[in-house]
């Protein structure tokens, strides 16, 4: 095997992306930004899958990534629709003001 | 064929009760009075057949099939006609028929005429089941059945609150005795595997040890049942109140027949009681004390029916006294004579009440003999018989009981019996003199209303008076009369009363007779010659008078010691324990769930970042656990 | 194996279900048609059940008319129905009371008649199913399924506090039955553990060897479910509320049939499945039964509401039944089964009667009445017979049952029988006191004086019950004879177990507790443990 990027590099990058995503979700107040951060987390996981697929010479990881992307696309469609509906109702994108499910 | 005797009145009851209103009144009356006549006829026929048999084997049986069969226990609708049942059936049908006839006149104007006769017929049917049953369980059917009829007839005029509560009281007090009796019966099943008279009474000497605790307890349980039905201490309290019922009912049920069921039960169970000397002793003492106790109360009462009711309790006490000393035949003899003279007394009293439009207070009567000759004459006969004056019926039977008491060595009980005899003479004739003799204390309205009863009421009076005067002779000479010889084989051989020597028996009889006459003379002097003297007497012993007058405050005692604590504790149980504690803990658990929910809902902030944070924290904790737990 | 050849028990369940379906298709406005149709369907079921009665073979101890069909093969549960001498009387009671209850609803129910009648038919199917199901899962299905129509009957057509009452009733019952479901699964797993066959077939499960300590826990779970349904003493408080709020027909079926499911459950499941535990629990349950008898009677005495009074009297009467069941001899158990029928008849009739005066006066408060005997003579006569049956007057049905129970109990334990006899006295106290205040005395309200006596339809409801009351009172043998063989077999299965007293029971719980093999069987159902990750290799 020629010199390749080691697996650890992918994993570290993926972890970094994931943490950024988590931080974004937790810290940011804009719903749209939170949504994007979630996408970031999904893609971080995708990266891990692809890296392992390559490392283990198995196509399973690649296939799962395709699944994840399909689900993510669906999620974006529904999520954006919800966000638009929220925006129309609340005139706000601030997540702190959206607490209709408060018990 | 024996089974027809109770079935006929039952059918009569159903016909009169269910469709009697739709038929002409005469027809309903004919049916109502025809069924006891038929039963009487059948009983007489059976009696004649019995007489034709040899003395030792006089027994007729018939069964209409099995009633309950479960596992190894079974009981049938079996009927039995032996000398004891025969006497009872004849008395029940005979007196019952007369009282049915009397009721035609007495109840003529009542709007519930049909209901009355339906119940009277039903009573007769149940009473006949009671005395003809060949096992204890069927006897118990009749036993509770007559209780039901008694309840419904005491409460016949149910719109009167007093009648309604008297009915309930009668049923409930009886039920206490019945509860004990049920325990006795189930014990009997355990011991004998059966409730048939034949099995139980024959096997008794082998199954039960003489004088054993089991024998005593078993017989005492039966006796408690008997004290309820036969109104003995301490369960007698319902009988005086039962006088709220129509007078024919008082005569038939609460004097002549139903209240003697307890006597019948003890006499029937004689072989059992023979094995339990302790129980017999208790029976004798309860009987003796009740006799004296009730007589003392009767001395000062003012309601004509209540005096006779206390007299009934007292006479029933005599019967138990006789049974208790082993003189079973004497007890049944007294039962029979008592049925005649007590029915007579009640019916005469009913005639008086009928004539006076419902007045029952003897202080407002007086001098009635001029207006009601037949009634007064028959009442006098009844009073003489009740007081035990020779040669009327009561004398013979009472004398025989007291002779047996003396012969069995119960000196104190004999004294009690003799004292009661004096008291009986006193209260009976106090009643007679106050009501029928002396000056009339009636007001004008009543005088105008006063009339002698119609023939349907007078006829039974005359017949019963004849009976009261003569029926005692079936027991003469004492100890070996017709009746005693007829009944003899029914009772255990050892129970034939020890007879005293003839001379001392005559002395005793004369002594008791003298006591009774003394009572009558005292009544004459205090209530007829000089009425003020009786008041002076009451004033001289106020405590005694008040005790008698208030009936020893027993009703009040029961009210405060039994009734009110039960109701109070039930109320506490219901309102405090059931509603607060039992149901409270159920609702408390539900409330706890709700409380937990309302605490947990605080976690649900609705803030998305909070949720995400908790997901994160949870994930980290879980991962950490997996990583470090190995 | 049915003598007719036809699946008659299934028919009994399916006909009311189909009837309910037919009703669904009918226009709800045609109330008269719907009422008559419901009555006709339930009566048809009753007639069919008479065939079961007629063809029942009294000599056979085992199940008759057995029907078996595969159902949920993967867990070994099958559609298994059958009748024996224990369930036959209760099956007949159910089919007998339902048409009467439907007839009783003709006048009382004015809104949503269609939905009401559908509920009644579903309820009938469910009740019949409970009494004929012999598969644990099938039984559970009917047991819980029958709650749903009852929930609606009380919750929709009930009185003022109906929602509270119906929730209490359903939650209380469910709390117990969830534990029972767990125990059922455990029984099946244990059976699989020892024989390797997965089954919920009751007949196969009986006689299995479950260790003593485990039996105690499983019995306790079953007993709790059944004791709530009976209801036994500390679990009874749902009953008065449910009765007070339920419509007349709901009360009739609740008291007449539903309560019997608890006592039936003890006889059918709890006793034969766990005989040793049952013997160990006998003292505890007998004590609770006696407390129930006396407590129910005392509390009934001071109730102001007629329906509450009757409800508490049920607690007392069912205490008798429980006492008899746990005396575990032929007389007591037969008396108990008979008393279940008796209670169904007399209490059912009492609720009908109370319903009748409620329809006339719109109150059930005792103090509102008085002197009704004068105004309503026919009603009074019927009421009297039913009251006397409830009190246990000899010659009527109640006495036969009570006497057999007492006689049997006395054999097993004298003290309990004597205390129970006090209950007989108290029964007379509360019933007659009520009678005195309602039927005798002066009327306390002017409205009472103008009431109409009961009419032909009401007589048609009461007469069958009264005739049965008399018939069973005078001739209980046809019923007793059909019970004999099955009860004898049951008693033999159960009574052989050693009796234990209360301390021993507690020690059994504490020391033997949840035994390892029990937990093992629950958590690892198959005999060879397997690694969940294996399939990933």
Image (cartoon, coloured by chain):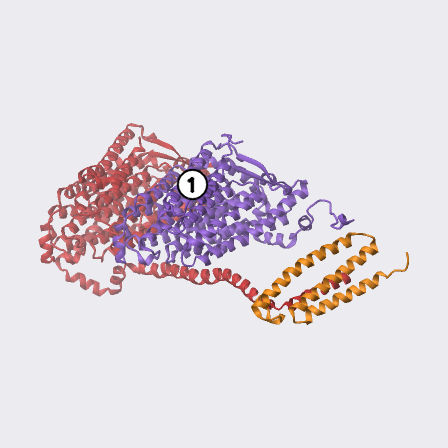
Q: Position of residue C470 (x, y in %)?
A: 36, 40
Q: As rendered, which of B92 and B10 lies closer to the eye? A: B10
Q: Colour of chain B?
A: red
Q: Position of residue C364 (x, y in %)?
A: 35, 56
- In which quadrant is the C terminus of chain A drawn? bottom right
Q: Can you tell which chain is drawn purple?
A: C
Q: Splitting the image into 4 quarters, where does residue B337 fall?
A: top left
Q: Position of residue B218 (x, y in %)?
A: 42, 45
- C168 horizontally vs B114: left or right: right
Q: As rendered, which of C140 and C300 lies closer to the eye? A: C140
- Regarding residue B181, the answer to whether it shows in the image is no
Q: Colour of chain A?
A: orange
* Residue C110 drawn above or below residue B29: below
Q: As rendered, which of C367 and B88 lies closer to the eye? A: C367
Image mark 1: chain: C
Q: As rendered, which of C59 and B490 lies closer to the eye? A: C59
- B183 horizontally vs B258: left or right: right
SS assignment at label 1: helix
Q: Furthest residue to the right?
A: A2
- In which quadrant is the N terminus of chain A drawn? bottom right
The residue wearing badge 1 is C42
Q: Residues within 10 Å of mark 1 (few under 14, many from 20)?
A: many
- Regarding residue B57, the answer to whether it shows in the image is yes
Q: Position of residue C188 (x, y in %)?
A: 63, 44
* Residue B489 drawn above or below residue B120: above
The count of marks equals 1
């Amino acid at each position: 095997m020629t010199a390749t990027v080691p697996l650890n590099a992918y994993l570290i990058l993926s972890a970094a992306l994931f943490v950024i995503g988590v931080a974004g979700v937790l810290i940011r107040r804009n719903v749209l930004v939170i949504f994007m951060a979630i996408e970031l987390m999904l893609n971080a996981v995708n990266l891990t899958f692809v890296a392992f697929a390559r490392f283990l010479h198995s196509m399973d990881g690649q296939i799962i990534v395709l699944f994840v992307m399909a689900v993510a696309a669906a999620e974006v469609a529904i999520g954006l629709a919800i966000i638009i509906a929220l925006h129309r109702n609340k005139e706000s994108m601030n997540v702190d003001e959206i607490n209709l499910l408060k018990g | 064929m024996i089974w027809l005797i109770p079935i006929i009145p039952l059918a009569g009851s159903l016909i009169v009760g269910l469709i009697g209103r739709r038929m002409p009144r005469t027809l309903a009356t004919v049916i109502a009075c025809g069924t006891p006549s038929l039963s009487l006829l059948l009983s007489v026929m059976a009696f004649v057949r019995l007489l034709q048999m040899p003395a030792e084997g006089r027994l007729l049986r018939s069964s209409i099939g099995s009633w309950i069969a479960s596992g190894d226990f079974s009981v049938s609708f079996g009927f039995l006609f032996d000398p004891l049942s025969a006497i009872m059936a004849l008395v029940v049908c005979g007196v019952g028929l007369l009282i049915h006839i009397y009721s035609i006149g007495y109840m003529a104007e009542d709007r519930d005429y049909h209901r009355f006769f339906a119940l009277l017929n039903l009573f007769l049917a149940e009473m006949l089941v009671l005395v003809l049953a060949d096992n204890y369980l069927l006897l118990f059917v009749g036993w509770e059945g007559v209780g039901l009829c008694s309840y419904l007839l005491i409460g016949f005029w149910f719109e009167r609150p007093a009648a309604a509560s008297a009915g309930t009281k009668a049923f409930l007090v009886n039920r206490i005795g019945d509860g004990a009796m049920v325990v006795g019966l189930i014990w009997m099943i355990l011991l004998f595997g059966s409730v048939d008279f034949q099995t139980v009474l024959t096997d008794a000497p082998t199954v039960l040890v003489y004088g054993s605790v089991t024998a005593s307890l078993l017989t005492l349980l039966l006796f408690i049942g008997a004290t309820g039905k036969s109104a003995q201490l301490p369960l007698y309290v319902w009988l005086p109140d039962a006088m709220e019922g129509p007078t024919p009912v008082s005569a038939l049920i609460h004097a002549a027949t139903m209240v003697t069921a307890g006597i019948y039960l003890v006499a029937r169970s004689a072989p059992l009681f023979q094995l339990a000397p302790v129980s017999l002793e208790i029976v004798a003492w309860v009987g003796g004390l009740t006799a004296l106790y009730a007589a003392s109360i009767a001395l000062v009462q003012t309601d004509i029916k209540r005096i006779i009711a206390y007299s009934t309790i007292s006479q029933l006490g005599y019967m138990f006294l006789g049974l208790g000393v082993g003189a079973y035949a004497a007890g049944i003899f007294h039962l029979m004579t008592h049925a005649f003279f007590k029915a007579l007394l009640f019916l005469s009293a009913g005639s008086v009440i009928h004539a006076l439009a419902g007045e029952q207070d003897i202080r407002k009567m007086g001098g009635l003999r001029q207006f009601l000759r037949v009634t007064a004459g028959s009442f006098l006969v009844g009073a003489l018989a009740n007081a035990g004056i020779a040669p009327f019926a009561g004398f013979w039977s009472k004398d025989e009981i007291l002779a047996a008491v003396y012969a069995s060595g119960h000196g104190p009980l004999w004294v009690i019996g003799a004292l009661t005899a004096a008291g009986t003479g006193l209260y009976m004739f106090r009643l007679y003199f106050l009501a029928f003799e002396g000056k009339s204390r009636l007001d004008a309205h009543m005088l105008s209303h006063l009339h002698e009863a119609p023939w349907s009421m007078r006829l039974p009076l005359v017949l019963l008076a004849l009976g009261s005067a003569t029926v005692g002779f079936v027991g003469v000479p004492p100890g070996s009369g017709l009746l005693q010889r007829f009944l003899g084989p029914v009772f255990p051989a050892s129970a034939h009363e020890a007879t005293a020597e003839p001379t001392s028996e005559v002395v005793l009889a004369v002594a008791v007779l003298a006591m009774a006459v003394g009572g009558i003379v005292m009544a004459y002097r205090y209530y007829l010659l000089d009425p003020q003297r009786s008041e002076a007497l009451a004033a001289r012993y106020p405590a005694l008078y008040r005790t008698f007058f208030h009936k020893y405050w027993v009703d009040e005692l029961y009210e405060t010691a039994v009734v009110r604590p039960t109701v109070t504790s039930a109320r506490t149980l219901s309102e405090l324990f059931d509603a607060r504690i039992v149901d409270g803990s159920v609702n408390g658990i539900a409330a706890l769930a709700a409380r937990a929910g309302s605490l947990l809902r605080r976690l649900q902030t609705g803030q998305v970042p909070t949720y995400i944070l908790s997901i994160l924290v949870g994930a980290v904790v879980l991962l950490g656990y997996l990583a470090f737990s190995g | 194996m049915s003598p007719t050849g036809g699946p008659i028990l299934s028919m009994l369940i399916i006909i009311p279900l189909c009837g309910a379906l037919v009703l669904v298709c009918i226009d709800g406005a045609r109330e008269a048609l719907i009422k008559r149709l419901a009555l006709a369907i339930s009566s048809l079921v009753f007639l069919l059940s008479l065939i079961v009665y007629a063809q029942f073979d009294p000599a056979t101890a085992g199940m008759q008319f057995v029907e078996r069909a595969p159902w949920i093969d993967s867990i070994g549960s099958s559609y298994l129905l059958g009748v024996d001498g224990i369930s036959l009387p209760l099956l007949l009671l159910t089919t007998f009371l339902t048409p009467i209850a439907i007839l009783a609803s003709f006048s009382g129910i004015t809104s949503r008649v269609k939905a009401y009648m559908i509920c009644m038919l579903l309820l009938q199917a469910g009740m019949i199913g409970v009494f004929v199901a012999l598969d644990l899962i099938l039984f559970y299905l009917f047991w819980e399924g029958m709650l749903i129509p009852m929930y609606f009957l009380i919750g929709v057509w009930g009185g003022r506090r109906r929602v509270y009452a119906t929730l209490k009733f359903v939650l209380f019952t469910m709390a117990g039955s969830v534990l029972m479901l767990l125990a059922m699964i455990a029984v099946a797993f244990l059976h699989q553990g020892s024989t390797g066959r997965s089954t919920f077939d009751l007949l196969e499960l009986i006689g299995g060897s479950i260790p003593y300590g485990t039996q105690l826990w499983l019995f306790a779970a079953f007993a709790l479910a059944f004791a709530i349904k009976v209801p036994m003493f500390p679990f009874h408080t749902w009953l008065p509320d449910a009765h007070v709020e339920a419509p007349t027909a709901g009360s009739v079926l609740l008291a007449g049939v539903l309560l019997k499911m608890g006592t039936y459950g003890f006889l059918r499941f709890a006793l034969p499945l766990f005989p040793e535990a049952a013997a160990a629990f006998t003292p505890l349950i007998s004590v609770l039964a006696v407390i129930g008898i006396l407590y129910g009677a005392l509390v009934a005495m001071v109730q102001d509401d007629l329906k509450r009074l009757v409800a508490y009297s049920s607690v007392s009467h069912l205490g008798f039944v429980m006492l008899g069941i746990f005396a575990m001899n032929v007389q007591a158990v037969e008396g108990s089964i008979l008393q279940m029928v008796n209670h169904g008849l007399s209490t059912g009739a009492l609720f009908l009667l109370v319903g009748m005066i409620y329809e006339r006066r719109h109150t059930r408060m005792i103090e509102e009445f008085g002197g009704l005997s004068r105004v309503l003579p026919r009603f009074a006569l019927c009421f009297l017979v039913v009251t006397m049956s409830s009190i246990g007057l000899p010659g009527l049905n109640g006495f036969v049952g009570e006497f057999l129970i007492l006689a049997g109990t006395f054999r097993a334990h004298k003290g309990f029988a004597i205390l129970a006899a006090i209950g007989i006295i108290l029964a007379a106290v509360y019933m007659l006191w009520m009678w005195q205040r309602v039927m005798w005395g002066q009327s306390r309200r002017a409205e009472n004086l103008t009431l109409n006596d009961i009419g032909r339809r009401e007589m048609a409801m009461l007469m069958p019950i009264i005739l049965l009351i008399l018939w069973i009172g005078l001739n209980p043998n046809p019923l007793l004879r059909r019970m004999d063989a099955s009860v004898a077999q049951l008693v033999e299965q159960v009574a052989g177990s050693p009796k234990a007293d209360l301390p021993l029971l507690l020690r059994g719980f504490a020391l033997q507790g949840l035994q390892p093999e029990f937990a093992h069987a629950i958590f690892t159902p198959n005999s060879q443990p397997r690694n969940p990750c294996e399939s990933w290799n």
